[in-house]
Image (spheres, grey):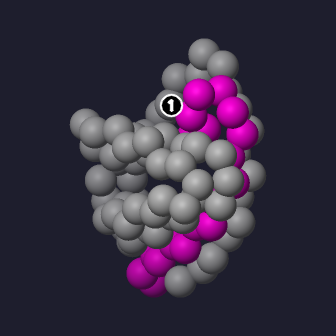
């Protein structure tokens, strides 16, 4: 498992290309709001919220509402 603190800049008019890979991810929102596109669903997370998912499902993490966000991401990738 590898932990990362990631600052997510706001995006305007961006097309979010989903990606998929082996492993699992845990995301905890430290500040701001982020949107998680996961398969055909979207999840809006605010400060203090978290999500855990299987990375083989197509996904993308980005800022929500044009505001910056900061997350703790813990990623597991099998070798």
Task: Look at 55% across and 73% down and name the residue there.
Answer: 74
Q: Could you tell me what secondary structure mostly forms the magenta stretch?
A: strand
- Whether 27 is drawn above or below 31: the answer is below
Can the viewer see residue 36? yes
Please state the extent of the stretch shown in magenta in the rendering.
60-79
Residue shown at the point (63%, 76%) measured from the top left: 3
Task: Name the image quarter holding the C terminus.
Answer: bottom left
Residue shown at 74% from the left, 52% from the top: 7
Q: Nearer the viewer, residue 1 or 32?
A: 32
In terms of depth relative to the viewer, which is nearer, 34 or 23? 34
Residue 61 appears in the rendering: no
- Farthest residue to the left: give it: 40
Residue 65: x %, y % from top left: 59, 28
Q: Position of residue 16 (x, y in %)?
A: 50, 31
Find out whether residue 5 is within the magenta segment.
Answer: no
26 shown above or below 8: below
Which residue, as the protein is rendered here, is positioned at the far top?
13
Q: Is residue 54 above or below residue 40?
A: below
Q: Secondary structure at mark 1?
A: loop
Which residue is tagged 1?
16
Residue 29 falls in image quadrant: bottom right
Residue 64 falls within the magenta-colored stretch = yes
In the rendering, at what x and y percent does residue 52 appear?
Answer: 38, 66
Which residue does the image show at 48% across and 48% down from the upper left? 45
Total marks in image: 1
Within-10-Å neighbours for mark 1: few <14, some 14–19, many 20+: few
* Residue 13 as seen in the image, left or right of residue 60: right
Tell whether 55 sits left or right of 33: left
Question: Percent x, y for residue 34?
Answer: 55, 44
């Amino acid at each position: 498992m590898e932990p990362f603190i990631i600052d997510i800049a706001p995006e305007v008019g961006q097309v979010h290309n989903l990606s998929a890979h082996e492993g699992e991810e845990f995301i905890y929102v430290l500040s701001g709001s982020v949107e998680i596109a996961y398969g055909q669903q979207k999840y809006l997370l605010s400060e203090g919220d978290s999500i855990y998912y299987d990375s083989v499902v197509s996904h993308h993490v980005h800022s929500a509402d044009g505001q910056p966000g900061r997350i703790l991401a813990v990623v597991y990738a099998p070798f």
